[in-house]
Each structure stands twice: as C-alpha cells, then as structure tokens.
Amino acid sequence: MKFTFDMTVGQLLENPKSRSVFEKYTPQLVHHPMIGMVKHFKLKDLMQYAGKANISQETVKKIQTELESLS
C-alpha cells in the first residue's frame, strides 16, 4: 500500500504503519478527543492548517517523507 497526503486521516490512522508516523510527530493530535471529526478529510486538505495547530512546515515535510517511504 502506498501512503500519501491524498488519503483520509481515518485511513492513515487505521493502518499501524502510518499511524506510527503520526504518533511520532504529532501525538497530541492522534489522541485528541475530537480527532473523529476530521477522519473523513484528506490529509492534504488539513495540512494547510498545520501552523494553526503548532505543527511546523518542517514537521509536515518529515511526515510526508516518512509516509511516502512506507511500504
């Protein structure tokens, strides 16, 4: 399976491999009580708001690179 920012948050969090990337870089979001409200959004659509969630562009790039390297 190829992991990309075109997948939904729910798809990425359901898979143990991709979920571990988010737990590594953004554990506060993975375990946020309102995460269910964004599970149907594509990750690329949410990443434009990363700065508002105190997630740097550097961290976003690391997440993207690591997701794309998973197989």
Image (cartoon, rainbow, N blue to C red):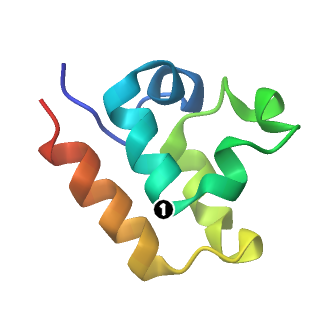
Q: Is residue 32 above or below residue 6?
A: below
Q: Quadrant of the C terminus?
A: top left
- Side of 59 where 8 appears, left or right: right
Q: Residue at x 56, y 58 (%)?
A: 47
Residue 20 x/y as whole percent:
41, 41
Q: Residue at x 66, y 23 (%)?
A: 40
Q: Which type of secondary structure does the marked residue at label 1 adopt?
A: helix
Residue 56 x/y as whole percent:
54, 80
The crowding category of the residue bearing disc 1, from other C-alpha atoms within 10 Å (few below 14, some 14 to 19, many at least 20), is: some
Q: Quadrant of residue 52?
A: bottom right
Front residue of 14/48: it is 14
Residue 8 x/y as whole percent:
52, 28
- Side of 34 where 42 appears, left or right: left
Front residue of 22/49: it is 22
Amino acid identity at mark 1:
Tyr
Q: Residue at x 62, y 51 (%)?
A: 46
Q: Quadrant of the N terminus?
A: top left
Number of numbered callouts drawn: 1
Residue that numbered label 1 is attached to:
25
